[in-house]
Amino acid sequence: MREGIHPNYREVCFVDLSNGFKFVTRSCVNTKETVKMDDGRELPLFKLDTSSESHPFYTGTQKSVDNMGGRVEKFRNRFGKVAR
């Protein structure tokens, strides 16, 4: 393999800012901060706004668009005939 052309692929700690959930995976993401893990390792830190622990789709708190006051049905009634 040629030297100097490959990204820096290493373990990175991702932190969900909404609930503090941490997980470690390998990534090429550029980071400026580091975090000290419980096992003594110091890893690069990447902050996330949303992860699978806080996203409504994965937590089961997502609202269906069809049940929000009939907006979808109003749209279909108004513009559904145009497409046919």
Image (spheres, grey):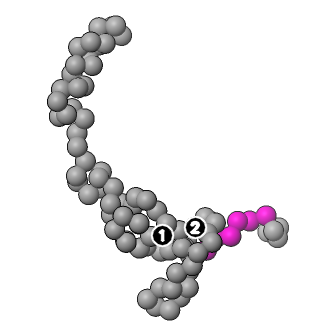
Circle 2 residues within 10 Å: few <14, some 14–19, many ≥20: some
Which quarter of the picture shows residue 67? top left
Q: Which residue is mark 2?
A: 27
Vertical side of 72 occupied by 48: above or below = below
| Sequence order check, earlier mark of 1 and 2 | 1
In magenta, the rendered stretch is 5-10
Q: Helix or strand or loop: what does disc 2 sit on?
A: strand
Identify the mark at residue 14; answer none if there is no mark.
Answer: 1
Vertical side of 63 occupied by 82: above or below = above
Kindly identify the residue that appears in the image at 18 percent across and 26 percent down: 70
Give, as a three-letter code, the residue at label 2. Answer: Ser
Give the spatial CA distance, label 1 vs label 2.
10 Å
Give, as a three-letter code, the residue at label 1. Answer: Phe
Magenta stretch, overall SS: loop
Identify the mark at residue 60; answer none if there is no mark.
Answer: none
Q: Does residue 29 appear left or right of residue 48 in this picture?
A: right
Tell me whether the residue at label 1 lies in contact with that at label 2, contact meaning CB atoms closer than 8 angstroms. yes
Kindly identify the residue that appears in the image at 54 percent across and 73 percent down: 45
| Rendered location of residue 1, percent (x, y) | 79, 68
| Rendered location of residue 50, percent (x, y) | 40, 58
Kindly identify the residue that appears in the image at 29 percent across and 52 percent down: 56
Q: Helix or strand or loop: what does disc 1 sit on?
A: strand
Which-is-in-front pick, marks 1 and 2? Answer: 1
Does 63 lie within the magenta span? Answer: no
